[in-house]
């Protein structure tokens, strides 16, 4: 008897439906075809043990299973439940009248219980698109898949629940999630708050500007000056994610199996990889491509602490994704694209010893050592960082103050108001939502300067020896400063403030 059941494979952040054809005929043997990897090929042992331990059995006949399309590689143990259900249906151990309405996925343990799978959300989205009515998967992934409406999601703990469901003995209760209600109920503020930060008013202002315009920022200062503490608090002042952004972010985290029992992700991601990270771990890839840290930071913040300690080639592979806001990984047989629209926040010491021009420090570095240290960060990478700010240690008087600083909630209100202005400005442009994403053409259109502002910018570039690449960055940042002030035109004050935030562009900065 021939039976067809359906599973799904995930490539990039999109799913492809897999048809599993099970044919049982005279003879003996178990033959699995359709380009399965080692984990899929080993499924016969898991299926056999799971069925035996639940008083069912593999039929002692010739079992041929084809996984179509046959030219797509099937990987992982998530097809165990699909194959087991197909075998049970083909051997008349379960009823199979409406089995073609189901997508079935799950990894089997030897006792018949189910382990969670990766990519439940993309699979559920594809199942709905292709007209499937039901999706059977492990209970731990049910909440995540139930985000998708018009699809009945059936979370199960073991294979017996699936058998009883198809035989009509006990129906599986569907998992229901009101996505919108859950989303708006769970918008919350992170545990880190700017009210904990003593002093550092100019740095807080910088962070506010960076958050309002989505600008990349680098913090330069000696150890203990508060660079990491400030960076960790940046997500607390970013506007809450929209439902569309939350779905997009959840899809990426689903593919790497980081959403178990969570459902929709509500908070913006904050990723802080160690400086020993490899190219592939940062941008994604591998033999079977997976998203890297830059994609897991999508719609959030990627924090690179001690930037010069990262290998230079690792930082260089980030240049194109920073510009394109997506990363494409090509292999001989396929290409996958992962979104990577994130805010880069980097920190670094001004010198190898960490203490630059500090008369109280016994540790000093020669100009040659400092130049070698700073040259680890290439010009083209710095070109993609809009704001450079020097962080100075907080004096004791400020540290011992009882008075709390301005809270993240207050700062977030101003940031959200500025973002709304930008959303209105760029509503006719696809893939442009805030100032940092502006192209040269849009900068010319939306960053027009008065004669006074032009004169100030010209003088500053000549006197401070600012590089030519700083010009567009200054205009973008000044546009954001104007939006925070809720003014249509960029004034000389806005330009003057933006010029201060280009420390590393100044020739002779080491002098």
Image: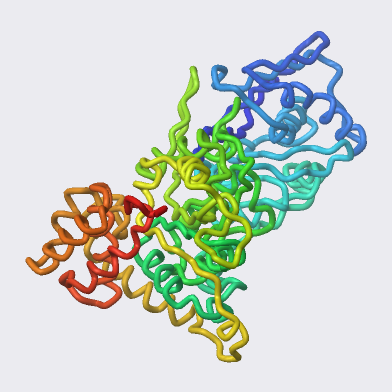
- Establish if 248 lies above or below 408: above
- Picture coordinates of residue 304 (x, y %)? 54, 51
Residue occupying image coordinates x 58% and y 79%: 196
**Image quadrant in which the N terminus is located:** top right
Front in this rendered view, residue 126 or 458: 458
Which percent across, then down, holds residue 463? 22, 58
Q: Residue at x 89, y 40 (%)?
A: 111
Between 497 and 326, the one nearer to me in the picture? 497
Number of marks drawn: 0
| Residue 294 can be seen, yes or no | no
Q: Nearer the viewer, residue 142 or 252?
A: 252
Which quadrant of the view contains residue 20?
A: top right
**Foreground pick, 180 / 315:** 315
Q: Position of residue 16 (x, y in %)?
A: 52, 33
Quarter of the image where the C terminus is located:
bottom left
The residue at the point 53 percent across, 33 percent down is 11
| Residue at (72% x, 45% y) in the render | 116
């Amino acid at each position: 008897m021939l039976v067809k059941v359906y599973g799904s494979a995930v490539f990039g952040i999109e799913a492809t439906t897999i048809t599993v054809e099970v044919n049982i005929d005279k003879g003996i043997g178990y033959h699995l075809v359709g380009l399965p990897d080692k984990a899929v090929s080993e499924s016969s042992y898991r299926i056999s043990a799971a069925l035996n331990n639940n008083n069912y059995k593999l039929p002692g006949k010739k079992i041929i299973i084809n996984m179509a399309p046959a030219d797509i590689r099937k990987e992982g143990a998530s097809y165990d439940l699909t194959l087991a259900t197909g075998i049970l249906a083909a051997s008349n151990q379960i009823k199979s009248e409406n089995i073609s309405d189901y997508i079935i996925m799950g990894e089997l343990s030897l006792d018949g219980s189910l382990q969670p799978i990766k990519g439940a959300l993309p699979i559920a989205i594809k199942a709905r698109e292709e007209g499937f009515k039901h999706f059977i998967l492990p209970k731990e992934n049910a909440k995540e898949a139930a985000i998708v409406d018009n699809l009945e999601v059936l979370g199960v703990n073991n294979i017996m629940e699936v058998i009883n469901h198809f035989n009509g003995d006990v129906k599986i209760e569907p998992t229901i999630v009101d996505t919108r209600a859950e989303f708006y109920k769970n918008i919350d503020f992170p545990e880190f708050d700017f009210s904990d930060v003593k002093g550092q008013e100019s740095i807080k202002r910088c962070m506010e500007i960076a958050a309002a315009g989505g600008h990349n920022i680098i913090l330069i200062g000696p150890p203990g000056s508060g660079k990491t503490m400030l960076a960790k608090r940046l997500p607390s002042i970013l506007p809450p994610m929209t439902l569309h952004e939350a779905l997009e972010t959840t899809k990426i985290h689903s593919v790497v199996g980081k959403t178990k029992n969570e459902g929709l992700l509500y908070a913006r991601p904050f990723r802080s990889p160690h400086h020993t990270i490899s190219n592939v771990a940062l941008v994604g890839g591998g033999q079977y491509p997976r998203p890297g840290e830059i994609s897991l930071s999508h719609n959030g913040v990627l924090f690179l602490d001690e930037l010069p300690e990262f290998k230079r080639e690792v930082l260089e592979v980030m240049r194109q994704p920073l510009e394109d806001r997506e990363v494409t990984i090509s292999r001989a047989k396929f290409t996958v694209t992962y979104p990577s629209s994130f805010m880069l926040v980097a920190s670094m010491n001004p010198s190898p010893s960490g203490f630059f021009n500090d008369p109280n420090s016994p540790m000093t570095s020669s100009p040659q050592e400092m130049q070698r240290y700073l040259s680890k960060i290439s010009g083209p990478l710095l070109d993609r960082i809009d704001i450079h700010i020097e962080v100075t240690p907080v004096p004791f008087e400020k540290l011992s103050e009882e008075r709390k600083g301005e809270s993240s909630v207050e700062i977030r209100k101003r940031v959200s108001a500025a973002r709304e202005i930008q959303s209105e400005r760029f509503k006719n442009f696809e893939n442009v939502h805030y100032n940092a994403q502006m192209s040269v053409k849009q900068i010319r259109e939306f960053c027009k300067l008065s004669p006074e502002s032009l004169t100030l910018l010209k003088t500053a570039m000549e006197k401070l020896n600012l590089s030519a690449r700083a010009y567009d960055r200054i205009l973008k940042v000044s546009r954001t400063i104007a939006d925070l002030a809720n003014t249509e035109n960029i004034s000389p004050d806005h330009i003057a403030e933006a010029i201060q935030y280009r420390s590393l562009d100044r020739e002779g900065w080491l002098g």
